Amino acid sequence: MKSPPTPAHVQPLNRRRWLAVLGSSLAGLFSLVPSRRAEGGGRERQKEAAMPDGYDPTRHRWLMALDINRCIGCALCVAACKTENKVPPEPTYFRTWIERYIIRKPGPGSGELRGSTIVDSPNGGRDGFPPSAIPRDQILRSFFVPKLCNLCEQSPCTQACPVGATFQAPDGVVLVDPHYCIGCGFCIQSCPYGCRFLNPNTRTAEKCTLCYHRITRGLKPACVEVCPGGARIFGDAMHPLPDDPLSEFVAKNKVQTLKPYLGTGPRVLYAGMDKEVR
Amino acid sequence: MRPHRIPPQILRLILLTLAIVGVYSVARYFLTPASFGRYGWYRAAALGEIAAYPPDYAGKAACAQCHKDKAEQIAKGPHKALSCESCHGPGMAHVGNPDVKLVKPAAPLCLRCHEANPSRPEWLKQVTLADHYGENCLECHVPHQPNEAP
């Protein structure tokens, strides 16, 4: 069979012409690359916000540790966090909160050493803790546990984000870029510690930033500032100060992390933790 | 020999693919922020933006600059580990302008830390209001040096 004749206006595309078309298209594309490399290039609409006082995020590694035996449950930290970070006042929006654990005495003849565990956190502890309804003589042990972002090494939240809006900064703090977040809530679902929430006003995900605006200025996070008992210990693992409370804390205490079996590699350390704490 | 021909429908597909890749690359070039990718797969400029928020709590060192007497007094007593702002609230506005008054707390705040509660650690001195000497803590305790009577 004969192939139909080529119409006159269609030029036969032989290999040579085809290669020429391909080559020039690729060259056109790659010519974009050098201008992309040149940072700035007038494309960032406003000037990049500078770090306070030449703060260099690659020269720090922030960390918080919690000493459960030092927590008195005043929860001034919860109130201070909400004020400092403009967290909505309603319950369920928390960047840090306090949980009260009450382990009951075992029933007689139950064959157990410890009774049931009751955990509560009325309004995250923001208004303090009223004495519990369980009478003192039925309580085996009771204590408060402060909770916050665990600064995971293998953070599930940053991996769940589809747009690169949440990330671990070089200084170890996990942050949310409010201009990039699309509010899909994947990160909130993926955090096994429940440390994130969707801000109802901005419709973006929010979480503990270790008070990034404070630590970059040389201040302590607000919760650490107001803690009366020294339950919250904050420091820089890369450049510890000579009398660094964090190094001293790690040297003196046997420390644990929350839910280590999940493989998230939490960096926040707890001392004096009971097996009931999750 | 017959010149090698690309069938026209394949050619259209190739050109379409190139066009899509080209449009994507151009769009990506214009839409990706300049600082994206400096430290990782995110916008590095966000670090500076988040760091630019204004703090509300000034820190104990700031208070001590003007209230040296109070800072020295508190360092002598059992409240030495407490920050001024634990009791007086966020003080940045007051540091900038002392005419902005801070709260002078009273008994409810003392009880927030000292009311007897079985969940509290034993090292903390706790009182049951009904068994203690009275409701007005400041009548008998100087807040900055609570083992002293005013």
Image (spheres, coloured by chain):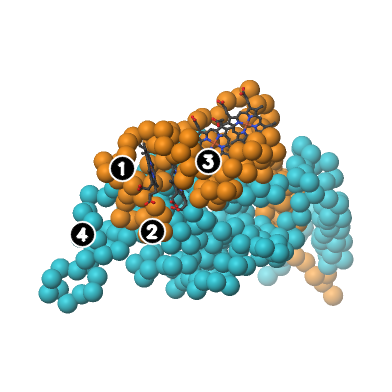
Chain colours: A cyan, B orange
Residue drawn at x 85%, y 61% is: A23
Q: Are marks 1 and 3 on the same chain?
A: yes
A274 on left or right of A196: left
Report in which chain the residue with disc 1 lies: B
Q: Chain of mark 2?
A: B
Give the image location of residue A262, x and y in percent.
Answer: 46, 70
Q: Residue at x 24, y 61 (%)?
A: A139
Residue type pointed to by label 3: His
| Residue underneath mark 3 | B144
Q: Is residue A93 above or below residue A253?
A: above
> Label 1 is placed on what type of residue?
His
Q: Chain of mark 3?
A: B
Choose the circle earlier in sequence order: 2 or 3: 2
| Towards the viewer: A179 or A231 | A231
Quadrant of the image occupied by residue A44: top right
Q: Is residue A66 above or below residue A86?
A: below
Asked if the residue under mark 4 is in contact with the one under mark 1, i.e. CB atoms within 8 Å, the reply is no
Label 1: how many Cα within 10 Å (few below 14, some 14–19, many 20+): few
The answer to which quarter of the image holds residue B99 is top right
Q: Quadrant of the N terminus of chain A?
A: bottom right
Residue marked by disc 1 = B132
Given residues A157 and A35, the one toward you in this image is: A157
Residue at label 4?
A137
Q: CA distance from mark 4 to mark 2?
A: 16 Å
